[in-house]
Every structure is written in structure tokens, then in C-alpha cells.
Image (tube, rainbow, N blue to C red):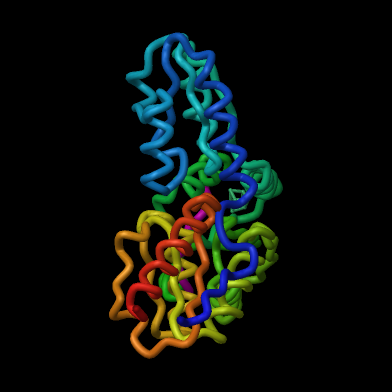
Amino acid sequence: MPQIIIAKDAGACFGVERAISLALDEAHVAPRGIFTMGPVVHNKRVVDALALRGIRQGQLEELPEGSKLVVRAHGVTPHELALATERGLILVDATCPFVKRVQDLAHSLELQGYQVVLVGDAGHAEVEGICGHAPSAVVLGSADEVDGLTISGPIAVIAQTTQSIECVEEVISALQARGFDVEFHNTICAATTKHQAGAIELAAQVDVMLVLGGFHSANTCRLTALCTEINPKTYQLEGPDELDPAWFSGAQSIGITAGASTPQSQLEELQEELEVLLGDAEA
Ligand code: SF4
């Protein structure tokens, strides 16, 4: 049977585990309901499990007065916070402290007169939350978007916490090539850096690499992209029922990593199901 190796630092990060735990703690004492704006994490199975405990998704404008609103690890804009307070909602702030730090930094840089450039995925909840704290920030998804940019310096570059450093460095190089003075504040979270490093290291060693996590999870998709560059036999999946025996034909070793929104229990479950699958194939 092929060897199965789990990547270093795979699976749920501190911020996600904290958000889930805070939501569950508060669900016990929420007579008027408990809600999140969007999924608390980009992991359907976690969201379904939370819904069974009464934690549902809702639109800010429609939540009943006196209900609890769990602010997700991604954070929200100051405008949304003000609206929630105005509507009489009870806030449970599960914003990851590392995301909060980026929000505060973006705000402070803008106040100091910098043009903030945020390298991240436009439309992602964390990016929108940060931009809410620095309304004139420009979001760039890649170096290709630097062409045609109409901004003036001084420029301060920050990054979505789950961004890859390679992408940020490419954006900085492209800005410098256009003659901009750039000050870089590395706001990529340490958990992300370790996570990506562990995945890349393992992808280079194994015959097949699996990435477990939601297809809507930016950090999981980024892990998949990084691993695929090194190992074309990389497959992303959301659960063990998606395992395809054809992926492992002739493989001697299989690596597994998981996105920051994937609990350890799901990682262990995948490993167990994979062992059963490979054992059946040998029998
Ligand atoms: S990846 Fe880092 S910044 Fe984002 S939620 Fe997890 S610990 Fe917080």
C-alpha cells in the first residue's frame, strides 16, 4: 500500500478554530437566534454542523433585534459593525486578531497619507473588511493588474493574510518597474506561511498530493495552485466521497494537506477513508 504522509501544519488555523468555538459557546445562550453574515468558514460540512446547533446565515438588514451576530474570522467593515449596533444586534466578535491587525494597519497607513495597495482576492470577505477600514485602498489580485493602474505614491503594500508571498513580490516588482516607491508591510499570517511551506515541501516528495478543503476557500485553492506547480498530480477535494481510485494508480506515496478552514477531524477522516480505499484496491 502507498505511504500516506500528512503535511506539516495542515488544517484549521487558530483564527478559524477560535471563531467556531466562540460561535458554539454563544449558541447556548441566544434566545433570539444566532447568525453569521455568510458562512462562518468556507467549509460546507462545518457550516451544516453549526446550522444543526442553531447558528444560521442571515442578511444584516433582516436579523431580528436582540439576536446575536457572530463576526466571522474574516472580519467586517466599520459600516457593517455600526449597522449591526444600530439594529440592536448583540455582537460576538470572532474576527481573527491577525486580521484585526491588518485592518488597523490599513487604516493607520491611509491616515498617514499612503496609497494602500492590498494584494488579495477582490470580493473576498477579508479583503472587503480591510478595505472598509481604508476606503481608498486599491486591491490587486496579481502583477498583471499593475498595468494601467492610475495611482500616485507614496505606496504602502499590504496583503490578504492568506496570500502567497510570491504573488505579493511579483506585484511589488511590477509597481517598482513602473517607478513607484513601495513600502511593504508583510501581513501574511504566520499560519499561512507555515501551511504553504509544509504543503510545498510535501508535494515535492510524493507521487500524488491531495488538498482537502472547500472550493470557495481562498486559502485552500491557493494551496492547490502552489502544490500543482510542483506536482501536477495534485487533487483538491471537499470530502472522502470524492476520492477517485484512478488518481493513485502506480503511486508509492500520497501526501495530504488541508486548508485553514478544514478541521483536524475531517483530515483524519480523509486519511482513514484513503487507507480503506487503498487496502481494498490491494485485496
Ligand atoms: S489564516 Fe491566519 S489570519 Fe486568517 S484566520 Fe487563520 S490565523 Fe487568522
Q: Viewed as shown, does residue 177 lie left or right of 184?
A: left
Q: Viewed as shown, does residue 91 lie left or right of 102?
A: left
Q: Which residues are magenta?
A: 135-143
Let me know if residue 119 is in the magenta part: no
Q: Quadrant of residue 39?
A: top left
Q: Position of residue 216 (x, y in %)?
A: 37, 54
Picture layout, residue 129 above or below residue 57: below
Q: Position of residue 74 (x, y in %)?
A: 53, 43
Q: Nearer the viewer, residue 82 or 161?
A: 161
Q: Nearer the viewer, residue 93 or 49?
A: 49
| Visible residue check, residue 117 | no
Q: Nearer the viewer, residue 198 or 115?
A: 198
Q: Residue at x 38, y 28 (%)?
A: 52
Q: Quadrant of residue 101?
A: top right
Q: Residue at x 49, y 29 (%)?
A: 79
Q: Residue at x 42, y 48 (%)?
A: 42
Q: Residue furthest front?
A: 283
Q: Viewed as shown, does residue 54 lie left or right of 12?
A: left
The quarter of the image holding the C terminus is bottom left
Q: Position of residue 102 (x, y in %)?
A: 64, 48
Let me know if residue 139 is in the magenta part: yes
